[in-house]
Image (tube, rainbow, N blue to C red):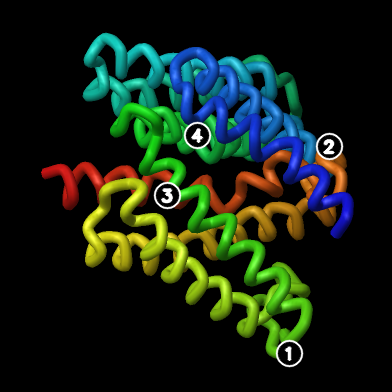
Amino acid sequence: MILRSLTILILVPVVAACTYLGGLAFLALVLALALFSVNEFYSMMMRRGYKPAYWVGNAITIFFIVFAYYSLKLNWEPAHSAILTLAATAALFSGIFLKRKKDTIMDVMVTLFGMVYIGWFFSYFLFLRNLTDHGAYLFFLMFSIWAMDIMAYLFGKAFGRHKLALSISPKKTWEGAIAGFLTCLIAASIFSGMASIPMVDALILGVLIGIVAQFSDLVESLIKRDAGVKDSSALLPGHGGVLDRMDSFILTVPIMYYYIVWIILR
């Protein structure tokens, strides 16, 4: 707990400052988080025996995020979807150069999965951040998930008895998940004013975040379970790897972005 707390005290101000400032500072933050995450993913898959074209995955991850940054500046956002096709094509081409006598298709699929799971989904951090001048919607999401994660961890550790997904993440419990979900609703209602989100929409977002973020966490746990590791890396003392800290956000950021664009800002 001491290590976890110290790491949070160091990293949270950096993340908050970059998010508030936006621009190149936020781009650098997202790129750093994405590159650490995608390499942790590929390292886990290499432990599993796969040989992804990690150089292709890294390059396309950078491309996704940098393209998203400039698409916002140059009003190219509609082209954002088109680049997924080009990137997938590049990943498939990479199989020609992997020079494996077997399992080449699996190596290509692992390469493709990594760049989409991390590079593509992380690009939505820039889109969500850009909806307000200082990233109010993203702060709303961060505070809601952080509050949920902390309560789920503490309540589950103290009172958890019924396993949520024993074969995937043995330490997660229904008690912790429910406590985290309820905390997410409370946090969403508290921070709705900060992001100028109507209370009804804030509560709906609280429900969506409280469910999707926990499933997103379990997806990463499933990847680690398949790779036979406890953490994605040991980079962050008390927390594991960068991917371990970002897991709840990966599938949640796009969901929140589209809800805001299609429902709140329509």
Q: CA distance from mark 4 to mark 2?
A: 19 Å
Q: Earlier in the sequence, mark 4 or mark 1?
A: 4
Q: According to the image, label 4 marks what residue?
A: 122
Instruction: Give the residue type that dot 3 points to.
Output: Phe
Density class for disc 4 (Cα within 10 Å; few <14, some 14-19, many ≥20) is: many
Between residues 132 and 164, which one lies in front from this camera angle?
Answer: 132
Q: Secondary structure at mark 4?
A: helix
Rendered position, 124 above or below 240: above
> Disc 1 marks which amino acid?
Arg
Q: Secondary structure at mark 1?
A: loop
Horizontal relation, residue 258 to residue 218: left or right? left
Q: In whole angstroms, how far apart are the C-alphas of marks 4 and 3? A: 17 Å
User: What residue sits 81% from the left and 52% below the top?
Assistant: 4
Q: Nearer the viewer, residue 261 or 183?
A: 183
Whether residue 108 appears in this view of the structure is no
Q: Position of residue 13 (x, y in %)?
A: 64, 35
Count of numbered circles on the image: 4
